[in-house]
Amino acid sequence: MKTQPETMRNHWWWRPGWSVGRRFYTWHLTFERQDDVHRLAAEYRSALAPLGEILTPIPDQWLHLTMQGIGFVGETKEQDVHSIVDTAQTRLAAISAFDVRIGPEVLDPEAVLLHVHPDGPVRAVRDAIREAIGEVLGEVPEKAAGFTPHVSVAYSAEDGPAEPITEALANLNLPPAHARISTAELIVIHRDNQMYEWETFAKVPLG
């Protein structure tokens, strides 16, 4: 593990603009039918299960790689969202599908993260999506800098010491997962149930 914070904080505090019932347009990479990713996530869920409710493990269905937000439903014109999808389709067609390796873990103060390598192709997809958003909206929400491709396998569910989690992870030596990235998804996401859950608005193929 590369980092070992001394304390954890509850990931599920309500960030500005968020509340029960709110929905948000955002781009993710998701892992439907990616058996090796599901294998690795299950191994982490098993290893972390003895810690009980201090962590929220992420089911296979909701595993994701966060990419780029657009805006809240009701504050963003749906016509603009459709235009962003159309523009992204053209830009993403120029990027070939690619393979990534997911893992090993890094402990963040709010989550157990798995870094994604190589990160260059993921960043290229995000850049293309940002260009599409900028072309339609004129400006792009969220900063380009500070993006680190990762997949979370569990979120911190309370404030407290990190030591129990670092101890649970200390002796793990799990083989990384391999995934094939061939699409980017625009989703409508919410966090009403202390989990990121969504419906797919559009799925855009690479290449």
Image (cartoon, rainbow, N blue to C red):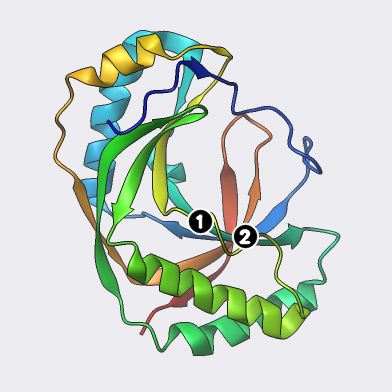
Taking depth in this image into account, of 101 and 202 the one nearest to the observer is: 101
Q: Residue furthest right?
A: 75
Residue drawn at x 57%, y 34% as measured from the top left = 195
Q: Specify which label sits upstream in the sequence, 2 or 1.
A: 2
Indicate the quadrant containing the C terminus: top left, top right, bottom left or bottom right: bottom left
Total number of numbered labels?
2
157 lies left or right of 62? right
Left or right position of 169 against 63: left
Front in this rendered view, residue 99 or 108: 108
Spot occupied by residue 67 in the image (x, y as percentages of width and height): 52, 59
Residue 177 percent across, percent down from the top left: 21, 48
Q: In this rendering, would 5 be left or right of 136?
A: left
Residue depicted at x 82% and y 71% = 77
Q: Position of residue 124 (x, y in %)?
A: 43, 74
Residue at 40% x, 48% y: name it.
150
Amino acid carrying label 1: it is Phe
- The residue under label 1 is 147
Label 2 is placed on what type of residue? Thr
Label 2: which secondary element: strand
Does 10 sit above or below residue 148? above
Residue picked out by circle 2? 26
Mark 1 neighbour class, 10 Å CA radius: few under 14, some 14 to 19, many 20 or more: few
Determine contact: label 2, label 1, CB under 8 Å: no
For numbered disc 1, what is the local secondary structure? loop
Query: Residue 35 in the image: x percent, y percent?
Result: 23, 49
- The residue under the point 77% across, 80% down is 138
Above or below, comparing residue 94 to residue 67 in the picture? below
Query: In the rendered view of the protein, which quadrant contains the N terminus?
Result: top left
